[in-house]
Image (cartoon, rainbow, N blue to C red):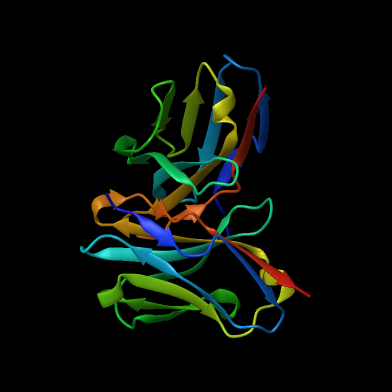
């Protein structure tokens, strides 16, 4: 069965650079969630989209922005990267009306 | 604020030992409850979930969990662990009134000695 796809899987950036993470949800899933998992920490909710509109916002820094496109894929844009942004970024998707989230493999971002 | 507490951060067991990982949440409304497992270097995988109905939920790989509403608990159990169960386990909840974002506990790292 198709799963959530995230790209890239690994990303290395320098401080103050920008990064774009992409998430392709499972077909027919219209809701996308982004989570950040720092080293040794639990995943923290960043932001979610439903039908291309932002549906909820968590602890997402102002330096980050995200959107969902007409094909339901989502991109997380991160600017002025800081060392503390080094983390695993998970995307999850869920179907219309669904309560279960299906997670992608994550993008491991390292900021040097 | 909604929170999820996992009682043990590290658990070490021998193979064939029984496992119980505690999880409590701090909200009195309607919740959906989940246990996720994260194997080293891998993504989160759903072990089991509770939305409604029978409070004893069976999941994959022989895991089960019991929802006790009066105790705000959703403890994970497995009668006999295997070396391959070595992983980090996260309890998580969603509140329908607050959208479907998952709020995770801090996680429990389980190490099974062979």
- Relative to the observer, which residue lies in front, B82 or B59? B82
Does A48 sit above or below residue B32? Answer: above
Q: In the rendered image, which quarter contains the C terminus of chain A?
A: top right
- Residue A30 at least partly seen: yes
Does B44 sit above or below residue B30? Answer: above
- Relative to the observer, which residue lies in front, A72 or A108? A108
Residue drawn at point x = 55 percent, y = 20 percent: A81
**Quadrant assignment, res A16:** top right
Q: In the rendered image, which quarter contains the N terminus of chain A?
A: bottom right
- Relative to the observer, which residue lies in front, A16 or B113? B113
Residue at the extreme right: B114
- Relative to the observer, which residue lies in front, B61 or B105? B105
Q: Is B114 left, or right, of B28 in this rendering?
A: right
Residue drawn at point x = 60 percent, y = 42 percent: A39
Q: Is A89 left, or right, of B97 in this rendering?
A: right
- Residue A28 at least partly seen: no
Does B72 sit above or below residue A1? Answer: below
Q: Position of residue A105 (x, y in %)?
A: 61, 48
**Quadrant assignment, res B6:** bottom left
Residue drawn at point x = 42 percent, y = 67 percent: B23
Q: Where is residue A44 in the image (x, y as percent from the top left)?
A: 44, 44
Residue drawn at point x = 58 percent, y = 45 percent: A5
* Total numbered badges shown on the rendered structure: 0
Q: Position of residue A98 (x, y in %)?
A: 35, 59
Q: Where is residue A59 in the image (x, y as percent from the top left)?
A: 38, 35
Does B101 sit above or below residue B72? Answer: above
Q: Is B5 left, or right, of A51 in this rendering?
A: right
């Amino acid at each position: 069965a198709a799963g959530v796809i995230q790209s890239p899987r690994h990303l290395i950036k320098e401080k103050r650079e920008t990064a774009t993470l992409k998430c392709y949800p499972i077909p027919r899933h219209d809701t996308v969630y982004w989570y950040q998992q720092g080293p040794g920490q639990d995943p923290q909710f960043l932001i979610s989209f439903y039908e291309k509109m932002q549906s909820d916002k968590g602890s997402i820094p102002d330096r980050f922005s995200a959107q969902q496109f007409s094909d339901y894929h989502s991109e997380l844009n991160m600017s002025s990267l800081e060392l503390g942004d080094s983390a695993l970024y998970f995307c999850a998707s869920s179907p219309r009306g669904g309560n279960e989230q299906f997670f992608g493999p994550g993008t491991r971002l390292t900021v040097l | 604020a909604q929170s999820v507490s996992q009682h043990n951060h590290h658990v070490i067991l021998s193979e064939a030992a029984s496992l119980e990982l505690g999880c409590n949440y701090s909200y009195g409304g309607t919740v959906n409850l989940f246990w996720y497992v994260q194997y080293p270097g891998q993504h989160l995988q759903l072990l089991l979930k509770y939305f409604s109905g029978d409070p004893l939920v069976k999941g994959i790989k022989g895991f089960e969990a019991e929802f006790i509403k009066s105790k705000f608990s959703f403890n994970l159990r497995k009668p006999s662990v295997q070396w391959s169960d070595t992983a980090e386990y996260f309890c998580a909840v969603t509140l329908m009134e607050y959208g479907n974002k998952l709020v995770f506990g801090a996680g429990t790292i389980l190490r099974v000695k062979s």
